[in-house]
Structures are given as C-alpha cells and as structure tokens.
Amino acid sequence: MADTVGTADPAGTAEPARPAQVAVVVIGYNDVTHVGDAVRSALAQGPAVGEVVAVDDCSADGSADLLDRLAAEEPRLRVVRRSENSGGCGSPRNDGIDAVTAPYVMFLDSDDVLPPGAVDALLTAATQARAEVTAGLCVRRELPSGREQPWQAPLYTAHTVLASPAQHPRLVHDTLCVNKLYRTDFLREHGIRFPEGRFHYEDIVFTARVLAAGPSMALIPDRVYVWHVRRSAEQLSISLDRDRIGNWQSRTEACAQAYEILLGAGQKELARAARAKFLDHEVRMYTRELGLRDPGYQRAWWTHTQEYLARYDAADWELNPGAPGRVLARVVLESPEPRDLPRLRELAARPARLLPPYARDADGVPVWSADLPQVTLEPFLTRPIEILPLAVDAELRLSARAARLHLRLHEMYGRVAEAGPREVDVTWGARDDERAWGRTTVALTPSSAGTDADSWFADVPVDLPALGAGTWDLRLTVRFADGKEREITAHALAGAGRLRRRAVPSVRHGVLLVQPYATHSGALALRIASGASGAVRVARGRLKRLLR
C-alpha cells in the first residue's frame, strides 16, 4: 500500500489522506561534504515525498558510495550514477525527470536544503489550485554567518492562483527551478527539459520553457528552499564565479535563448519583460563588479554587452526609461570603450545612486555627461522622488573622544529642492545577522552658499562601543516635506585618509579598531574589532594577506 499523508486546514478539520505524490531530484558532483544533508532534508519532508532520486554526476570523492549507504537504509531513496561527468547541472536533472514515477517533481542541489514543511506547503497549494506549477519563497543563506536574504520576495507575499504566467509578467525575474513543484506529466507532455551538457545558467532556459508552455500556477508565501551561499568555498558556484568573461557570455546566451523561447511561443509580454529583467538584474549586477576586473576583462565585457544590447528595439527602451538599468545600458551602447566605471558602479547599486556632475545639453535637458549628451536623463524630471537615484556622500570622522557621521545629500536637477528634504533616519545594520542599532533621526540642513550650494547636510554621532565588533552597513531613509520617503545607501568618500583604520580608546572594550571602507557597490560600511583579541585577529589577517 502506498504511503499517505493528511493535512489540516486552518480551522483544524483534517483533510482526507492522500498518496505520497512528490519526487525530489537531488543532483551532485564531488560534494560528499554536503550531499547527505541535502538528501536527508528531502526525506525529512515526510510521507508526501514518495521518492528521492539522487543523481551523481560521476563524482570521484566518494559521493556515490555515501548515497549508496543512505539508500541501503531508506527505501524511498534511489541513486542514479552517470558514467561520464556532464559538465553542468542540466543533464543530471534531465536524468532525474526520466527516472521519477511520482505525479509531482521538484529539484534540489547537493549543497542546499529543503526547509521543514516545504513539500507539504507546495503540494497542498498545487492540489487545491490544480496547478501545473507551484512556486514558493527561496531564501539565500550566507554561510557561515547564517544571514538570510529572500529571493524575489515581491512574488511571494500572498497565496495567488494564475490561469497563466502571462497574468504576472514579473515571474520572469524568478529564474530558479528549485523553489517550484512541477506536475511531472506537464513537463513530459510539453517536452520541457534542461539544456544538456556544459551549459551554464540552465535554470534561465528551463524556466523560459516552462513559462512559454503557459501553465496554470500557484504562488505561496511559504519558505520552500534554502539556497546556501558559500563565498569562501574553494570551488565557487557558477552564480558566484563571475570574474571570467566566459561567465558573462554564458549568462547572456541563456538570456538570449529565454527571450527567443518566449517570443517563439507567442508570449510577447513575457518576452519583453525578460529583456527588461536583463537590464534591471544582469546588467546592474555585473556593472557593480566591473571596476574590480582587469582592463582586458573590462574591454571584453563592454564589447560583448554592446553586441547583445544591439538586438534591443525601440519598444524595449521605452519600457521604464528612467530605470537605472536602462541608463547603464545606454552608456555602454553609446561609448566605444569602458568609461565612468565608478559612477556606473554607484548607479548599479541597490538602491541606485547617481553621483554628480549633473550635466545638461545645449537645450537644458539632463544628460549623462557633457561629452555623452546622447544619453538623456530627461525621465528624471518626472520620475517620483522616492525612486530617483539620489546621491548621499558619507564620511565617518574619528577622534580620540568621539565618532561622527557627516552626510551630504546632493541636489539632482532641482528635484530634491522641489520635494523639500526634511530629515534622515540613520541606522547601522549588522552584516552577519539581523541586528540593527542606533536608529537616529536628524534634520537635514540646506547649505547657504559656496561650493556646497544645492546640498543638504546632517551630522550624526556614532556610538562605536555600543556597535561593538562586527561588520556594519549604513542604512538611510530620507524624508521629504510631503511625507514621502527614499531608502538609500551612502557613497563612501575616499581619499585624504578618510578610509584609514584607526584605534579608538573605549572604556567598555579597552580599544576598538575601526575601519571605514567602501563596499563593492561604493557604499560606506564599517568593520570593528574590539579588545586586544580583536586587534590580534586583525593583525594576523593582515599578515596572511601580505604573505600570499
């Protein structure tokens, strides 16, 4: 007799028991350290999971033997061994699709886990809505800190049923395959498979094929997948290993295929949304990191991006023309070689910051710069103040007795003065957890004259001993006369020793080592080490870097 599972509705009335209906396909390659945890998290979902198919992509580290031992103790687990390594994630997932017998299937990577209750939540929504695809919230968990960040959270704020994905074009932003439950017969009837072999970003293409088939869908706010992010791993995941131009070329190829798939299926609105997503997500993410790369990479990236963006038509550019991604892309298209990388990095930040100068053309129209007037910023004249890429400079001024944060809000084509900035909320958020400290509200004071004209200033005390050891991100909220708000990060002023590490006496800690620094996106952040032990750790870390 098949295993059955029952669930209860909110009123406490038990639903009829139903057969186990879900297969979880776990793929892995040379990941013996983590694959066991992934498989156990799938089995721990309970009797709703009828089978777990673990596909080993010809590992050489003992992963297959570990899986065999687990399978000997768990009848729901089957192991599929590939005789040759595929070089990607698509082929082993396709093997899993071929192997499963359950009416529903979902995917799990060997270094991630399913949180408790994920399968029950997805299956309940799928059966109640008779949905062919059901999706839930994925969270990115940074390790070892454990800090979590939801992925595409606006899609998963409430239970939603869609007759077709065309009803919600923003679905193209969630290109993950792992936070979704699919009807197995839906995938097979439409021939939906992953790209085979060494194809990076296979999720993007697979998801486009799913959306192109126009499935009925259910969206739920439940956490259904935990994506582990290990930035210190010896072998970075594809999504983190972005320092080679081949990664960008693979990403653009996957996005190009996704667009063609959607367009070819007659899903014109989804296809257009996919092109917009490329500007808002891919271009911004890689532009933030462009200044970290060598000149050869920068030139190759610039040329390849120009070639890709040349495929866009007028309608693509007309969609949300004032969005930061559109401006970034226009600068790339209109300039023959890499330029203005620090300024582009700031505009690519989330939230975006457009640093001065704020140029105008001969007719007074806002433009990117005096020597690139063809990139217009005219939409900024009508864009709501709360989504403008406002720029705030920040400097932490340290002395033996106190620390003060100096802020400067820049004018932007008259829009800031028009909105009337009144005050700013200042909060320090801990990088490694959800702590927030020191929320302070201070008035913004307009400058009177001189080189700082058309600016607003604030001076805020910072209680460094209260912050204590850790890495702290600066978060600001600017409030305007009509009550509207703009959340923003602050540009870290560099030069003249502004970002130099300082030792600050502390009654509580003895001594604090304080390091203001600029993040990859140019925002001000702080590293603080406390006490003698903290100073020793900093010294050891610096010595290790010097010896490399």
Image (cartoon, grey):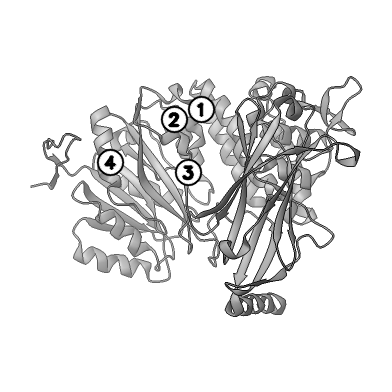
Considering depth in this image, is 484 or 185 the residue closer to the camera? 484
Secondary structure category for the residue under label 1: helix
Asked if the residues shown at circle 2 and circle 1 are in contact, with their CB atoms under 8 angstroms apart, the answer is yes
Asked if the residues shown at circle 4 and circle 1 are in contact, with their CB atoms under 8 angstroms apart, the answer is no
At 83% across and 58% down in the image, what residue appears? 495
Question: Could you tell which of marks 4 and 1 lies nearer the N-terminus?
Answer: 4
Residue with the mark numbered 2: 211
Q: Quadrant of residue 408?
A: top right
Amino acid type for the residue under numbered disc 1 = Leu
At 43% across and 50% down in the image, what residue appears? 91
Secondary structure category for the residue under label 2: helix
Q: Is residue 423 left or right of residue 340?
A: left
Residue with the mark numbered 3: 151
Q: How far apart are labels 2 and 1 at the CA level?
A: 7 Å
Q: Is residue 122 visible?
A: yes
Considering depth in this image, is 297 or 518 the residue closer to the camera? 518
Asked if the residues shown at circle 3 and circle 1 are in contact, with their CB atoms under 8 angstroms apart, the answer is no
Amino acid type for the residue under numbered disc 2 = Leu
Mark 3 or mark 1, whichever is nearer to me:
3
Amino acid type for the residue under numbered disc 3 = Trp
Q: Is residue 506 left or right of residue 21?
A: right
Q: Where is 535 relative to 46, above or below? A: below
Residue with the mark numbered 4: 121
Residue 22 image position (x, y, % from top left): 25, 44
Q: Where is 479 relative to 458, above or below? A: above
Secondary structure category for the residue under label 4: helix
Secondary structure category for the residue under label 3: strand
Q: How far apart are labels 4 and 1 at the CA level?
A: 29 Å
